[in-house]
Amino acid sequence: MPPCCFRESASKAGIQIEVQREPEDGYWTNVWNVQPFCASYWGGRPTQDSRYSTSYLSTAEWNDTRFKRDDFDKLLLQARSELDETKRKDLYRTMALTVRDEGGLILPVFNDYVNAASTSLKGFVHDIGNDLSNGYVANRVWFDN
């Protein structure tokens, strides 16, 4: 969503936002998780545990919403070790509702990407949690005909 649209959308809810553009080369160091408010995006994660451990666990380095709840952390650890699929599903549902209702996330965009593979593709390096070889797919791969 372009900054003007984000600002206009927020203003309809009575929230005033002053959009400040930052240089791309320093954004992740100087702005994201440093400034009191910033925009971000999240790529997919393979499991709910991975998503919550990365983004919502109180001690998570990438907890950009500053979401910190001891009860949530305990549920996450409990769900991670729960062998009963129904109980584990209920625990993750409880966590999802908590994040939805109290998490503080403002998500302006969803990533739109598709990954594919071919036996003639060479040089691909799989980087878990990141799409298209951590963004370096164009530099790393070639087709072997």
Image (tube, rainbow, N blue to C red):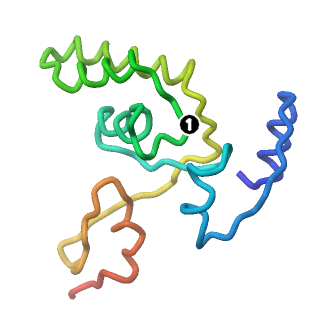
Q: Residue at x 61, y 63 (%)?
A: 27
- On screen, 23 above or below 50? below
Please state which amino acid type lies under the numbered disc 1.
Answer: Thr
What residue would you read off at disc 1? 65
The image quarter in which residue 46 lies: top left
Q: Residue at x 17, y 73 (%)?
A: 119
Q: Where in the figure is residue 111, as x and y percent of width and height?
A: 52, 52
In the current view of this chain or complex, which residue is farthest to the left?
A: 83
Q: Residue at x 53, y 23 (%)?
A: 100
The image quarter in which residue 120 lies: bottom left
Q: Is residue 106 left or right of residue 8?
A: left
Element at badge 1?
Answer: loop
The image quarter in which residue 140 lies: bottom left
- On screen, 7 above or below 72? below
- On screen, 62 above or below 59? below
Image quarter hosting the C terminus: bottom left
Q: Is residue 72 left or right of residue 82?
A: right
- On screen, 1 above or below 121? above
Q: Where in the figure is residue 10, as x and y percent of width and height?
A: 80, 36
Q: Is residue 84 left or right of residue 125?
A: left
From the viewer's side, name the closer residue of 129 and 26. 26
